Amino acid sequence: MALKSTVYKVALGISDLDRPYYAEHVLTLARHPSETDERLMVRLLAFALFADERLEFGRGISADDEPALWRKSYSGEIDLWIEVGQPEERLLRRAAGRAAKVVVLAYGGRSMDAWWLREANALAKIGRLSVLALDEAQCDALKALANRAMNLQCTIQDGQVWLTDGVQTALIEPRELQAVGAR
């Protein structure tokens, strides 16, 4: 018997002073049985960082032809393709062929550092690609906020992300490994 996804309900208030963008989002996230709370929360962080009325979650781990998140123009072109984790160069090259901009929000501690050392030269050749990295302590703080019913407030200013559920607060400072254009 196949395992079913776990559903997470999220009320997310975003105050992004860097863009500026201010909105309340009610989200339903499905966590695939093979997905960790860490990956789920990194996807949610990616949503907060790039929030827009047209930003959508992809089908997830089980779909090779869709990203973790994406934003399409009103005419259907892919404006933004967001991956989380340590995607293969081949996937990112294909994404850059389909989207105006590709962003990776990398995490994974030492394995992420090894991934970056191995892939950095090849990824530098992908002109539409930005890579941001989260350290292990930041991911642990994100995981601590994971709950099946979340009510979170997110404040973004000067590249710092403050995410709180009213009891716990996580300070996230994504490190830029490769930059291309502005979000």
Image: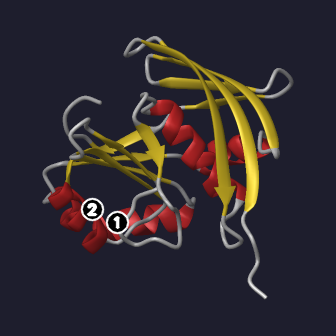
Tell me if label 2 and label 1 are in contact, CB under 8 Å.
Answer: yes
| Picture residue at 69% right of the left edge, 62% below the top | 36
Q: Quadrant of residue 98?
A: bottom left
Answer with left or right where residue 144 lies relative to residue 38: right
Local crowd size for mark 2, using a 10 Å CA cut-off: few (<14), some (14–19), many (≥20)? some
Res 120 label: 2
Image coords of residue 102 (percent x, y): 28, 49
- Quick one: quadrant of the C terminus? top left
Residue 22 versus residue 132 in the image, above or below: above
Secondary structure, mark 1, is: helix
Where is residue 158 drawn, in percent x and y? Answer: 44, 17
Furthest toward the front, the residue is 75
Image position of 127 (left or right of 162): left
Residue 103, numbered circle? none
Few, some or many residues within 10 Å of mark 1 (<14, 14–19, 20+): few
Q: Residue at x 64, y 38 (%)?
A: 27
Q: How far apart are marks 2 and 1 (CA)?
A: 6 Å
The quarter of the picture where residue 24 lies is: top right
The x, y position of residue 134, in whole percent, is 52, 46
Q: What residue type is labelled 2?
A: Ala
Q: Is residue 180 left or right of residue 165?
A: left
**Residue at position x 30%, y 70% from top?**
91
Helix, strand or loop at mark 2: helix
Looking at the image, which is closer to me, 131 or 71? 71
Q: Which mark is residue 117?
A: 1
In the current view of this chain or complex, which residue is farthest to the right? 167
Residue 40 relative to residue 59: left or right: right
Q: Nearer the viewer, residue 38 or 9?
A: 9
Q: Which amino acid does label 1 sit on?
A: Leu
Residue 56 x/y as whole percent? 46, 44
